[in-house]
Amino acid sequence: MQAFLNPRIDFLFLRYFGIAIAMCGWLKTPTAEGTPVTLSVSSHPLAIGATLFYDPSNGYLRARSAGADFTTLELHSLSAQFIPAGSTPAMSPFDLALPEKLFRLRVDGITEIEFGQVMPPDLGPRQVIDDLLIDGSFLGGGDLQSRGNGPYLLIVPEPASGAIVLMGMLGTLAFRQAENGRKRNP
Protein backbone atom coordinates (compact mmCIF):
# COMPACT_ATOMS: atom_id res chain seq x y z
CA MET A 1 0.00 0.00 0.00
CA GLN A 2 1.32 3.39 -0.97
CA ALA A 3 1.71 5.89 1.91
CA PHE A 4 1.29 9.02 -0.21
CA LEU A 5 -0.33 9.31 -3.60
CA ASN A 6 1.18 12.59 -4.77
CA PRO A 7 5.02 12.82 -5.10
CA ARG A 8 4.87 16.63 -4.67
CA ILE A 9 3.11 16.25 -1.30
CA ASP A 10 5.68 13.58 -0.32
CA PHE A 11 8.52 15.99 -1.08
CA LEU A 12 6.95 18.93 0.80
CA PHE A 13 6.07 16.74 3.78
CA LEU A 14 9.61 15.36 4.07
CA ARG A 15 11.17 18.77 3.50
CA TYR A 16 9.17 20.56 6.20
CA PHE A 17 9.33 17.59 8.55
CA GLY A 18 13.14 17.67 8.23
CA ILE A 19 13.22 21.42 8.92
CA ALA A 20 11.01 20.92 11.98
CA ILE A 21 13.33 18.20 13.33
CA ALA A 22 16.40 20.39 12.73
CA MET A 23 14.74 23.34 14.52
CA CYS A 24 13.87 21.16 17.51
CA GLY A 25 17.49 20.07 17.74
CA TRP A 26 18.69 23.67 17.51
CA LEU A 27 16.29 24.86 20.20
CA LYS A 28 17.47 22.15 22.59
CA THR A 29 21.12 23.23 22.41
CA PRO A 30 22.20 24.65 25.79
CA THR A 31 24.30 27.60 24.57
CA ALA A 32 24.60 30.11 21.78
CA GLU A 33 27.08 29.50 18.98
CA GLY A 34 30.17 30.59 20.93
CA THR A 35 31.75 28.88 23.90
CA PRO A 36 30.74 30.28 27.30
CA VAL A 37 33.67 31.65 29.28
CA THR A 38 34.32 32.56 32.89
CA LEU A 39 34.60 36.13 34.07
CA SER A 40 37.63 38.02 35.37
CA VAL A 41 37.44 40.60 38.15
CA SER A 42 37.88 44.26 37.21
CA SER A 43 38.08 47.40 39.34
CA HIS A 44 36.61 49.67 36.64
CA PRO A 45 34.35 49.37 33.56
CA LEU A 46 36.08 48.47 30.33
CA ALA A 47 36.82 50.91 27.53
CA ILE A 48 36.18 48.10 25.01
CA GLY A 49 34.30 44.86 25.61
CA ALA A 50 31.73 43.55 28.08
CA THR A 51 31.45 44.21 31.80
CA LEU A 52 28.99 42.47 34.12
CA PHE A 53 27.98 44.51 37.19
CA TYR A 54 26.86 42.75 40.40
CA ASP A 55 25.51 44.66 43.42
CA PRO A 56 26.01 42.54 46.57
CA SER A 57 23.58 44.64 48.60
CA ASN A 58 20.54 43.44 46.63
CA GLY A 59 21.74 40.91 44.00
CA TYR A 60 21.09 43.26 41.05
CA LEU A 61 22.84 42.19 37.85
CA ARG A 62 23.39 44.18 34.66
CA ALA A 63 25.79 44.12 31.72
CA ARG A 64 27.32 47.00 29.80
CA SER A 65 29.03 46.91 26.45
CA ALA A 66 31.68 49.42 25.41
CA GLY A 67 32.66 49.70 21.77
CA ALA A 68 29.74 47.76 20.23
CA ASP A 69 26.17 46.98 21.25
CA PHE A 70 25.06 43.56 22.48
CA THR A 71 22.70 41.55 20.31
CA THR A 72 22.64 38.49 22.57
CA LEU A 73 23.77 37.86 26.10
CA GLU A 74 23.54 34.51 27.85
CA LEU A 75 24.51 33.77 31.45
CA HIS A 76 24.73 30.28 32.94
CA SER A 77 24.69 29.61 36.68
CA LEU A 78 26.48 26.32 37.39
CA SER A 79 24.65 26.02 40.73
CA ALA A 80 21.27 27.21 39.34
CA GLN A 81 21.15 30.16 41.73
CA PHE A 82 19.41 32.72 39.49
CA ILE A 83 16.15 34.05 40.92
CA PRO A 84 13.73 34.25 37.95
CA ALA A 85 11.11 36.18 39.97
CA GLY A 86 13.55 39.10 40.32
CA SER A 87 14.18 39.35 36.58
CA THR A 88 13.29 42.45 34.59
CA PRO A 89 10.34 41.94 32.20
CA ALA A 90 11.10 40.24 28.90
CA MET A 91 11.55 42.59 25.94
CA SER A 92 11.42 39.88 23.27
CA PRO A 93 9.71 36.50 23.02
CA PHE A 94 13.16 34.88 23.20
CA ASP A 95 14.21 36.40 26.54
CA LEU A 96 14.59 33.74 29.18
CA ALA A 97 14.93 33.66 32.98
CA LEU A 98 15.47 30.24 34.56
CA PRO A 99 17.38 29.25 37.74
CA GLU A 100 20.26 27.99 35.59
CA LYS A 101 20.11 30.39 32.60
CA LEU A 102 19.42 34.02 31.68
CA PHE A 103 19.17 35.04 28.03
CA ARG A 104 18.47 38.36 26.32
CA LEU A 105 18.07 39.05 22.60
CA ARG A 106 18.13 42.55 21.08
CA VAL A 107 18.33 42.36 17.28
CA ASP A 108 18.85 46.14 16.98
CA GLY A 109 21.61 46.10 19.59
CA ILE A 110 21.71 47.57 23.09
CA THR A 111 24.52 49.04 25.18
CA GLU A 112 23.25 47.98 28.60
CA ILE A 113 21.15 44.97 29.58
CA GLU A 114 19.40 44.98 32.96
CA PHE A 115 18.71 41.52 34.37
CA GLY A 116 17.29 42.72 37.68
CA GLN A 117 17.65 41.22 41.16
CA VAL A 118 18.42 37.75 39.87
CA MET A 119 21.40 36.84 42.07
CA PRO A 120 21.44 36.12 45.79
CA PRO A 121 22.78 39.11 47.76
CA ASP A 122 26.05 39.17 49.70
CA LEU A 123 28.12 37.10 47.28
CA GLY A 124 31.83 37.80 46.96
CA PRO A 125 33.68 38.15 43.66
CA ARG A 126 35.10 34.60 43.82
CA GLN A 127 31.63 33.10 44.41
CA VAL A 128 30.18 34.93 41.42
CA ILE A 129 33.10 34.10 39.12
CA ASP A 130 33.13 30.42 40.11
CA ASP A 131 29.40 30.11 39.41
CA LEU A 132 28.84 32.09 36.18
CA LEU A 133 29.62 31.41 32.56
CA ILE A 134 28.88 34.10 29.99
CA ASP A 135 28.35 34.06 26.24
CA GLY A 136 26.95 36.48 23.72
CA SER A 137 27.43 38.45 20.54
CA PHE A 138 27.81 42.01 19.33
CA LEU A 139 25.94 43.97 16.70
CA GLY A 140 27.86 43.71 13.45
CA GLY A 141 29.36 40.33 14.40
CA GLY A 142 31.77 38.91 16.92
CA ASP A 143 31.44 37.19 20.26
CA LEU A 144 32.36 38.49 23.72
CA GLN A 145 35.90 37.19 23.46
CA SER A 146 36.59 38.96 20.15
CA ARG A 147 36.35 42.51 21.53
CA GLY A 148 38.47 43.80 24.37
CA ASN A 149 39.98 41.55 27.00
CA GLY A 150 36.71 40.60 28.65
CA PRO A 151 34.29 39.71 29.77
CA TYR A 152 34.83 41.15 33.23
CA LEU A 153 32.94 41.25 36.52
CA LEU A 154 32.73 44.51 38.45
CA ILE A 155 31.41 44.33 42.00
CA VAL A 156 29.46 47.49 42.80
CA PRO A 157 30.66 48.78 46.17
CA GLU A 158 28.15 48.57 48.96
CA PRO A 159 26.87 51.93 50.24
CA ALA A 160 28.36 51.23 53.68
CA SER A 161 31.86 50.72 52.26
CA GLY A 162 31.44 53.88 50.15
CA ALA A 163 30.54 55.82 53.29
CA ILE A 164 33.61 54.49 55.09
CA VAL A 165 35.87 55.57 52.23
CA LEU A 166 34.22 59.01 52.16
CA MET A 167 34.64 59.43 55.91
CA GLY A 168 38.30 58.44 55.61
CA MET A 169 38.87 60.98 52.87
CA LEU A 170 37.15 63.74 54.87
CA GLY A 171 39.19 62.84 57.96
CA THR A 172 42.43 62.98 55.97
CA LEU A 173 41.45 66.34 54.48
CA ALA A 174 40.61 67.74 57.92
CA PHE A 175 43.91 66.46 59.34
CA ARG A 176 45.88 68.07 56.49
CA GLN A 177 44.04 71.38 56.95
CA ALA A 178 44.86 71.33 60.66
CA GLU A 179 48.54 70.59 59.93
CA ASN A 180 48.72 73.40 57.38
CA GLY A 181 47.17 75.80 59.92
CA ARG A 182 49.76 74.85 62.58
CA LYS A 183 52.63 75.36 60.14
CA ARG A 184 51.43 78.88 59.30
CA ASN A 185 50.77 79.92 62.90
CA PRO A 186 53.39 78.28 65.14
Image (cartoon, grey):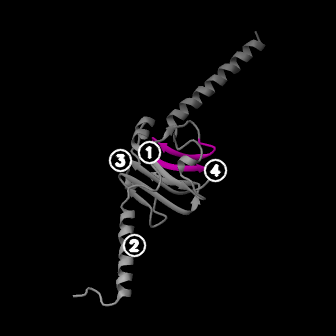
Q: Name the quadrant of the N terminus.
A: bottom left
Question: Which residue ends up furthest to the left in the rendered image?
Answer: 1
Are circles 2 and 3 on residues that touch, CB within 8 Å?
Answer: no
Judged left or right of residue 109, residue 131 is: left
Q: Distance between the residues labelled 4 and 3?
A: 30 Å
Q: Which residue type does callout 1 highlight?
A: Asn
Question: Which of the 4 image quadrants contains residue 110?
Answer: bottom right
Between circles 2 and 3, the one closer to the viewer is 2
Q: How far apart are marks 1 and 2 (CA)?
A: 44 Å
The spot of residue 113 in percent (x, y) is 53, 54
Camera-side residue of 81 and 5: 5
Q: Which residue type does callout 3 highlight?
A: Gln
Residue drawn at x 53%, y 62% as measured from the top left: 106
Pointer 4 residue: 67
Mark 3 Cα-neighbour bin, 10 Å: few <14, some 14–19, many ≥20: some
Pointer 1 residue: 58
Q: Which of marks 1 and 2 is nearer the N terminus?
A: 2
Q: Earlier in the sequence, mark 2 or mark 3?
A: 2
Q: Earlier in the sequence, mark 4 or mark 1?
A: 1
Indicate yes or no whether the magenta region holds residue 54. yes
Are circles 4 and 1 on residues that touch, CB within 8 Å?
Answer: no
Camera-side residue of 31 and 98: 31
Task: Specify start and end residues of the magenta stretch as a single range.
Answer: 45-67
Q: Distance between the residues labelled 3 and 1?
A: 14 Å
Could you say which disc has been placed on residue 145 in the image? Answer: none
Pointer 3 residue: 81
Q: In this view, does 178 lie above or below 49?
A: above
Label 2 sits on a secondary structure element that is helix
Q: Which of marks 4 and 3 is nearer the N terminus?
A: 4
Residue drawn at x 38%, y 87% as measured from the top left: 8
Q: Which of marks 2 and 4 is nearer the N terminus?
A: 2
